[in-house]
Image (cartoon, rainbow, N blue to C red):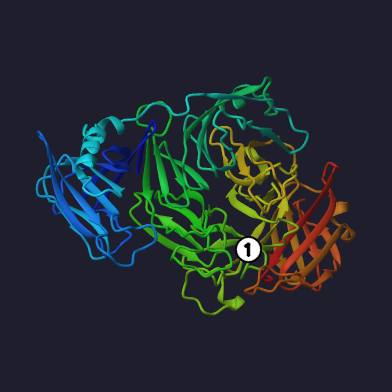
Amino acid sequence: GLYSFGPQTVISYTVGETPILEMPARGAAEGRGVTAPISARMLRIGPRAAALTLLVATHADRQAKLRVSHVADGPRRTDVALLSAEGPGDRPRGVSETTTIAAGVLPAIPRAVWKGTDDGRLLLTIPAGNEPLEFTVWHTRSPAANSERVLAEVAWRSFGTPVNFEQFTRGGPRRWPAILTTRISLLPGDGPFAVDVLAHPADNPWLAQMRFTGLDFFDDGDTLAACTWDGDVWLARGLKGLAREAKPNGAPDAPVELAWQRIASGLFQPLGLKIVAGKIHVTCRDQLVVLHDLNGDGETDFYENLNSDHQVTEHFHEFAMGLQTDDEGNFYYAKSARHALPALVPHHGTLLRVARDGSRTEIVANGFRAANGVCLNPDGSFIVTDQEGHWNPKNRINRVTPGGFYGNMFGYHDRTDASDSAMEQPVCWITNRFDRSPAELLWVTTERWGSLRGSLLNLSYGYGKIYVVPHENAGGQWQGGMCDLPLAAFPTGIMRARFHPHDGQLYVCGMYAWAGSATQPGGLYRVRYTGRPVHVPVKLHARRGGFDITFSDRLEPAAAGDARRFALKTWGLKRTANYGSEHFDERPLAVASASLADDGRTVRLELPDIRPTWCMEIKYSLRSAEGTPVNGTIHNTVHRLAE
């Protein structure tokens, strides 16, 4: 991991079983015909059972020769290693006969050995030992011959004072001392949901963009942590004020203040955050990192690399998305594949499980393109979305089981059968007009959301919406669809959400980067259920000759029994190596009759021509039991028809 101390960074790692601390430094040599920058690595190497070899530098001329010069200045003694391109011959551009790499160690290490290799590398072998060593390795590129004494003097002057590594590993001064305050005016909603804008300090002293990509809550109920796509982590304190001043309908009397603190920076495109045992864990493109505050000032002093098994290439599209844990403490996230290109590394296009202690990573399933997050199901399976693209005709929601293959032939796997029957089928295909880019899903686990408890929700980065996902298990194959929750679209793309463990309401965050319709850079919100009826579908059941829709709340029987209030159509897709798919064989599906079941919530549609279909649209215009309009659209998939 990395220790952060003001402008200094200490790298912590191991070689075999040997712990090592390393801090970079720099200096400059000037005088006696020598002008050169000097790079240095200040090191503390722990006990080592075997000798260690350090790569110090590489000469551009692979035929460079090594010469070691002993330099003494009173009690100060060191060896300077010089790797030089000597004599005539063809060389790389910019390398002359006198180009020399000079390097040294301060203080001198007994029995350390310099070595030059046949391919131009300069190595330093450090002997085995039971005691830790603290020293500095420096090197520079110098065009001047016989410059070792000048360079040694500069190195003694610049790096001769031993480094107190303990000072740099106990927590440093705050880098972002300002606590920024925002005010939130909360208003009661006039529908089943009210949305509270948890204002964030977009205008901050550091010009940091706040494009939120993950959030979670601390046990105190007052503080949340949120990460941003640009590499920061923030704390927002004051959530208890949302409940303390709440009226019976859930809206507080007076504005609530949130105190924002920037606590971490420099992370590589974080797209998931989870708090475990009071520690913030973040999914980054290069690692799963744990943030440690060592001195109690709130800021991160140590960035612990818990696991970095997933490999990184230069391709822009291979994001690491979402972060969840199971009951055993294992971590889960999805690793994207490359766009329009075959996979290069084993983790391209996979759902991954990381052991609780970070010791290993397992591939749970593969064949994904860009699965934006992960949801754990009560039965031990998973839900992930995927994005339209090559081998993926439209966006989709997948129920994932271990070992499954989900269709992307460009992913890393050994599958050669590109037929549709060779892949696991999704819960539903989602056409672009309905949701152009789905994000993460989550289950409604709180009683505060009334009749929606136990329902599955889907977030939309593309349109900034939240959908309910009614579904069924049709003989082992999950099938279902999506329908908007009755609330206005958010101004930013919604990426992640969690229910607050204390107030039971849904906190959502999001951002915009590209390929979305909700273009505000970022946002953080609370979605409150007001207690009013929701009237959204919570269950779908496809059967031979008909289709049943169960709503969250009671409906007016006359409207529910009027077949003219429903309009259905179906269409197909073609999965190929091309990007996406148009609609094929789009046609209306006639409704012979409609009726309302005895529960007052389930509408039974008789559809003589129903058959399995990749895509179906159901539009309805009904009334609630209280007489208010209930209008909506369902997009769904039917794989099997029950008898």
Q: Is residue 16 visible?
A: no
In x, y percent, where is residue 56? 26, 52
In x, y percent, where is residue 271? 53, 48
When the figure is inspected, residue 637 is found, relative to residue 31, above or below; the finding is: below
**Quadrant in the picture for residue 312:** bottom left
In x, y percent, where is residue 47? 15, 46
Quarter of the image that includes the N terminus: top left
**Quadrant in the picture for residue 476:** bottom right
Number of numbered discs overlaid on the protein picture = 1
In the image, 608 versus 268, the foreground residue is 268
Apparent side of residue 305 relative to residue 624 in the rendered image (left or right): left
Outermost residue, top side: 254
In the image, 261 versus 65, the foreground residue is 65
In x, y percent, where is residue 474? 62, 67
Quarter of the image that includes the C terminus: bottom right
When the figure is inspected, residue 495 is found, relative to residue 582, above or below; the finding is: above
Q: Is residue 629 visible?
A: yes
In the image, 291 versus 460, the foreground residue is 291
Identify the residue under disc 1: 427
Are there few (<14), some (14-19), or many (20+) residues within 10 Å of tag 1? many
Apparent side of residue 624 relative to residue 48 in the rendered image (left or right): right
Q: Secondary structure at mark 1?
A: loop
Q: Residue at x 30, y 54 (%)?
A: 99
In the image, 155 versus 8, the foreground residue is 155
Amino acid bearing label 1: Val
Apparent side of residue 179 relative to residue 626 in the rendered image (left or right): left
When the figure is inspected, residue 135 is found, relative to residue 384, above or below; the finding is: above
Q: Residue at x 19, y 41 (%)?
A: 149
